[in-house]
Amino acid sequence: MKQSELFTKTLREAPKDEDAVNAQLLIRAGFIDKLMAGVYTMLPLGLMVRNKIEQIVREEMAKIGGNEIVMPVLQPMANWEKTGRWNSLDVLFKFTSYYTKNDYALGPTHEEVISPLLKKFILSYKDLPRYVFQIQNKFRDEPRSKSGLLRGREFLMKDLYSFHANQKDLDKYYELVIKTYMKMYKRLGLGGNTYVTFASGGTFSKYSHEFQTVADAGEDTIYICDKCKIAVNKEIIKEQKVCPKCGGSKLREARSIEVGNIFKLSNKFSAPFGLSYRDERGNMNDVVMGCYGMGISRLVGTIVEVSHDDRGIIWPESIAPFRFHLVELRKGIGRDLYRRLQAKGDNVLYDDRELSAGEKFADADLIGIPYRLVVSEKTGKKIEVKKRDSKNTKLVGYGTISKLS
RNA sequence: CGGGCUGUAGUGUAAUGGUAGCACGAGUCUUUUGGGAAGAUUUAGUCCGAGUUCGAAUCUCGGCAGCCCGACCA
């Protein structure tokens, strides 16, 4: 893509009302735009990153049997009354139709939709287990959204729901999801500082599990067992003072961002909606459910929080909007290289703008694409390569570049 | 939802009751071109509403909006 055709621009300074690093850098670099508190537009570069994260998530969901769907955001009150959450869930966005006077909710999570949906298809034990997920904007009436993409009122989430014949089968799948989540965080460049975390909220099991990425900007406090690489959320530390795995009491405190949360739901939602199946003996049983959330847009913010320097963002290669940032320092001098890389199918942002070198370098650092390629009169037929997270530059030939891709 | 702070041009920032100014950006022209270039010229602003006053960006009241702390957070 030619940078001259990108409609967004970078900002030299961050808007003064943005305090969070992720918001400052993402806005300055032209990845997102704020419409109102907790509600953001994904601009071209931001959407590219988000799409790459989604792609990784889809690949991993496919490996554990996930069927992808998209459920409605707009939902009838009746479903929410059935589970009692019309009144108990305080972050539920509710409104009344001007014409019909009917009440509606905007989906903050989708148990109230997926449970009646699967009731239409799960009749027998032969229809179990089932795994269904979606990637969709969620709406939550947060009393205080904050920190850029970390706590929004409208945000993108992957929500997976699993349906089982019994608790044992759920337990097995739940463990598989934990492994899959850790694999996804690793692929997203968060492997080194993301921990499976024991948390409250288990209605039918002692704990729920969160996935927490260590970052100062986080809202949570966790206690990490470095030996087992797991953590305990502060909210349950009074009842759980030692590592749940090894029993050790050497726990390290850290601030962290919740990047995923999974629950065993048992029959909490299947019962009110009559989601049940006939077993081998012909008896009716409630379907046993699990749900598994992952905040995609929050992940974009989290990655920026943990991967940046004073010049800008440093995207992990797996989710960078482009692989190469080709910067030409003389009009047209990079055109041939751009075409060659394009023809090879490489992901390249070509800075063909007529700006000073300093400005282009500053933008490249701010945007944070992994490999910066500079061509100028000075480089001749060679190409200067610099990794975003390194200070060293190297003059190489085209062959070396193509090996990088 | 309680508390605090803040709303001036696209962005940042001055003007403390008396001519709304500066920088960057953007437009035009010329010269430049390896870490945010130079000159000339143009462009664009006091969140909204009421009040006090000869006069309000500035003071008062109301509203709206944003940020931060806390509470909340399937």
Image: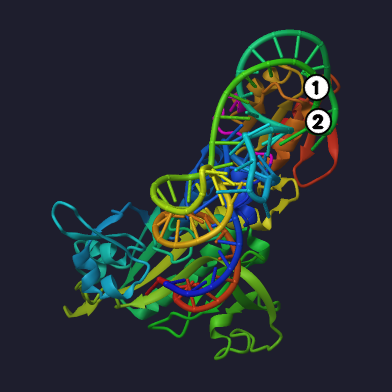
The image position of residue A117, as x and y in percent, is 23, 61
Left or right side of A394 for A104: left
How many numbered tags mark residues here? 2
- The answer to whether one can see residue A262 in this image is yes
Gap between marks 2 and 1, in whole Å? 9 Å
Magenta residues, dominant SS class: loop
Amino acid type, label 1: Ser
| Contact check, label 2 and label 1, Cβ < 8 Å | yes
Q: Residues within 10 Å of mark 2 (few under 14, many from 20)?
A: many
Q: With respect to residue A200, does A37 lie above or below?
A: above
* Quarter of the figure with the N terminus of chain A: top right
Task: Say whether disc 2 or disc 1 marks the residue closer to the N-terminus.
Answer: 1
Relative depth, front residue between A205 and A213: A213
Q: Secondary structure at mark 1?
A: loop
The residue that label 2 is drawn on is A384
Parent chain of label 1 = A
Query: Which numbered tag is attached to residue A36?
Result: none
Nearest-to-viewer mark from 2 and 1: 1
Q: With respect to residue A206, does A260 lie above or below?
A: above
The part of the chain drawn in magenta is A1-12
Extreme-left residue of the structure: A100
The residue that label 1 is drawn on is A376
